[in-house]
Amino acid sequence: MTIFDKIINKEIPAQIVFEDEKCLAFRDINPQAPVHVLLIPKRPIPTMNDVQPSDAELMGYLMVKAPEIAKQLGVAEKGYRLVINTNAHAGQTVSHIHIHIIGGRALSWPPG
Ligand code: DGP
């Protein structure tokens, strides 16, 4: 159980930008850009290392939804970044897979 389960269950508030039966997208509490949304599966997979072949349909679904949400948020044309941090070296702080959708300004590359 993580804080994201509480957001899914509406036990704590979040600024939700998209929701359906499989996933939820809400604004990051600590935005790194004008648009910073987290897209999560409602099924709580802890990290990318835990993804199984049986999760392929769900993971593909998220990859279809991410650009739809980017379009909805108005960042698709100029561009945005999708990030999935995994474990300590990447700075993952919540053990429930989340895709960061970041845009609304030019982003530097490579990451630090
Ligand atoms: P990561 O470092 O990839 O594990 O990103 C976790 C993100 O989750 C981080 O950018 C901040 C965000 N976050 C943590 N707790 C909350 C919360 O309670 N509400 C919202 N909206 N975002 C949260």
Image (spheres, rainbow, N blue to C red):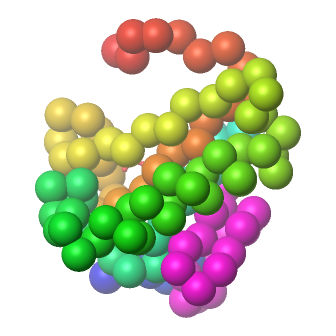
Q: Which of 23 and 27 is in front in this view?
A: 23
How far from the left and from the top, in percent, is residue 36?
64, 42
List the single residue furthest toward the top: 109
Image quadrant holding the N terminus, namely bottom left
Residue 14 lies left or right of residue 21; in this view the side is right
How far from the left and from the top, in percent, is residue 82?
50, 38
Residue 43 lies left or right of residue 68; in this view the side is left
Q: Count every numbered label the image shows and give the total.
A: 0
Q: Residue at x 67, y 14 (%)?
A: 106
Q: Give the range drawn in magenta.
A: 8-29
Confirm whether residue 111 shows in the render: yes
Residue 50 lies in the magenta-colored region:
no
Q: Residue at x 69, y 25 (%)?
A: 79
- Name which quarter of the figure residue 96 lies in: bottom left
Q: Residue at x 71, y 53 (%)?
A: 69
Q: Is residue 37 above or below residue 31?
A: below
Residue 45 lies left or right of residue 98; in this view the side is left
- Name which quarter of the figure residue 14 lies in: bottom right
Q: In this view, does 56 lie above or below 49?
A: below
Q: Is residue 102 above or below residue 21?
A: above
How far from the left and from the top, in percent, is residue 9?
55, 89
Q: Which residue is drawn at 44% across and 38% down?
A: 83
- Name which quarter of the figure residue 85 lies in: top left
Q: Nearer the viewer, residue 8 or 41?
A: 41
Image quadrant holding the C terminus, namely top left
Residue 9 lies in the magenta-colored region:
yes
